[in-house]
Amino acid sequence: MRLRWFLLAVLIITGAIFLYGVITAPSKLNQIEFVIVEKSGPWKADISQYVLSYVRVGQDLTPEFLSNLKKEIEALPWVEKCRLKVDRGKLTVQIWETHPKFVLIADNETYLIGENGFVLKKGVGKIGKYPIFFFKGKYAPFTVKNGFLMLKKSVKMELKLLSSKLSEIELKGKKPEISLLDSGVQLAFKSPPFLVYLGIGGDAWYRFSRLSKEGFFKPGVYDLRFEQMMVIKGRQEKCSGKKSLR
């Protein structure tokens, strides 16, 4: 009697172990599906191309593999975040795409920059829908991360600060051409045609805002990068040279 109960217990334990092994055994990839949950551009083909280079049919979909795959996908320029689901060998990749932020023009080439600082596209056709910045520094504004072009941290910080400064001043509907230089910022206005040179920080932006409200700027070149000083060229003969703004 005892032997019968013992054999029954062994059978139950063995069955439980087998069942646990079946349940916990990794699925093998036989199908993959891409779902764009939040779309911001035509990036699905680029994303799927890179994802398919990481996986293969028959791949064991282990937790470790899925964790690494998620990191690889979220390292792509066009991906803000992703979610992976596995159902009996079918891998579903849900994608939230990175949103474009602005266009940077450098060396006569256009670059669409995402919120993450990566270049989402080189050679932008319709750039009017995005804010536009020109880069006229001596060195390239990009570095390479994970094999993709990305704004250098210094350039990204300067552009962020520049955007903040521009949002603080009133330009009365005027939209200047904005260029980031090695030593500050150049604003080019069309009507009236004049150039203004500003530093990234300091009080130059306050002085520029005050003079704009007063209607001070006429055709010419104005350099406000000097502390409490302005250099004027081309406005009027009597105004050329340096003028104190104390």
Image (cartoon, helix red, strand yellow):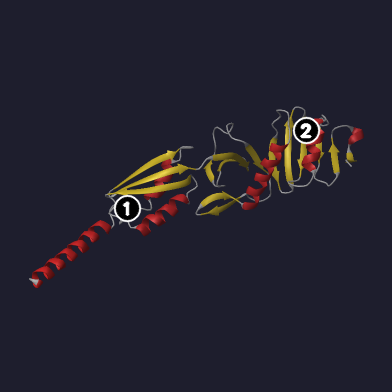
**Pointer 2 local density, CA inside 10 Å: few below 14, some 14–19, many at least 20:** some
Q: Quadrant of the C terminus?
A: top right
Residue 36 falls in which quadrant of the image? Answer: top left
C-alpha span from label 2 to label 1:
59 Å
Relative side of 120 to 63, left or right: right
Question: Amino acid type of disc 2?
Answer: Phe
**Pointer 1 local density, CA inside 10 Å: few below 14, some 14–19, many at least 20:** some
Instruction: Establish if 184 lies above or below 6.
Output: above
Which residue does the numbered mark 1 point to in the structure image? 56
Q: Of callouts 2 and 1, which one flags the residue occurring earlier in the amino acid sequence?
A: 1
Relative side of 76 to 135, left or right: left
Q: Position of residue 177 (x, y in %)?
A: 69, 35
Relative side of 11 to 170, left or right: left
> Disc 2 on helix, strand or loop?
strand
- The image's mark for residue 220 is none
Q: Name the residue rendered at 88%, 32% in the picture.
A: 236
> Circles 2 and 1: CB distance less than 8 Å?
no
Q: Position of residue 185 (x, y in %)?
A: 73, 43
Question: Amino acid type of disc 1?
Answer: Arg
Q: Name the residue rendered at 92%, 34% in the picture.
A: 238
Relative side of 191 to 3, left or right: right
Which residue does the numbered mark 2 point to in the structure image? 194
